[in-house]
Image (tube, rainbow, N blue to C red):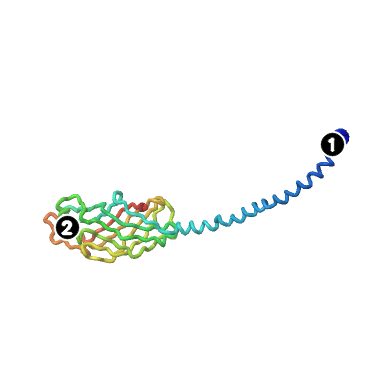
Amino acid sequence: MATLLALLVVTGCSGGAAVENVVPQQSLPDEQPTEAVAPVEPVPTEAPAEAPASPTVEEVLPTTEAAAAEPVAFAIVPEESVARFVIQEVLAGVDTTVVGVTNAVEGQLYPNFVDPAQTTVGAIRVDLSTLQTDNGFRNRALRDAILQTANPEYQYATFTPTALNGLPESITLGQPFDFEITGDLLIRGVTRPVTFLATAMPVSETRIEGRASLTIPYTEFVTIPRLPPQVASVDENVTLELDFVAVPVQ
């Protein structure tokens, strides 16, 4: 008991010096766990190993450009498009311009905004039975005698493109450009190779407006069996036109 009291007195009188001597001796065993914690250090080394999994900018851009270069299907919008023929005739002694129109037009085109030379156009079809002029008698003559659209085989005119010439090297939105579309035109069972002169304007990446026209002797496709008394003559050439609006297929 006396020994214990003596020890307490010595410790209390020594102040912090005794603590300094004791702590190093007690901390020596405690320092060893710091080496056991060392395996935590590999955590930073694992993060860089995952970095290559994320594509770099250089890897993404070629893929994006390749996708942009692929043509997208655009469909003609009938409500905003019109097919027409224009021909001159002498009616009751007066030179008259006859125009027949319809918006029963269907077809697709595949513009390539990155590489215009890769643009293609699908078959364009017009329902001739829906053509209307400003004269009921003429409309009946078109249906019954000239185009004979009551016959299902003659109801449609179809243009099947085979080549596009004169396309620009680059396209600028809002800027029109001219080119030619060569293909086969089928009217009333007769097919002829023709070339339409065309103008197209990419209004935006989701809207294209344009016009295609062709002037050709109408006798290439049809005949007029008999002119009515009030029609003195009909011009030999007829102009075929298509004003179109096309948007991406939904």
Residue 86 lies left or right of residue 168; in this view the side is left
Q: Residue at x 23, y 56 (%)?
A: 127
Q: Position of residue 27 (x, y in %)?
A: 78, 44
Above or below residue 30? Residue 6 is above
- Distance Cα–Cα, label 2 vs label 1: 118 Å
Give the residue type at disc 2.
Ala
Please tell me which residue lies in front, 130 or 65. Answer: 65
Q: Secondary structure at mark 1?
A: loop
Q: Provide the residue designation for mark 2.
A: 150
* 2 or 1: tag closer to the N-terminus: 1
Q: Secondary structure at mark 2?
A: loop
Q: Position of residue 201 (x, y in %)?
A: 38, 53
Q: Provide the residue designation for mark 1.
A: 16
10 Å crowding of disc 1: few (<14), some (14-19), many (20+): few
Give the residue type at disc 1.
Gly
Q: Residue at x 13, y 60 (%)?
A: 226
Of the two numbered discs 2 and 1 in the rendering, the one whose residue sits closer to the viewer: 1
Asked if marks 2 and 1 touch (Cβ < 8 Å), the reply is no
Residue 28 lies left or right of residue 112; in this view the side is right
10 Å crowding of disc 2: few (<14), some (14-19), many (20+): few
Q: Residue at x 27, y 58 (%)?
A: 125
Please tell me which residue lies in front, 148 or 181. Answer: 148
Is the N terminus in the top left, top right, bottom left or bottom right quadrant?
A: top right
* Quarter of image, res 10: top right
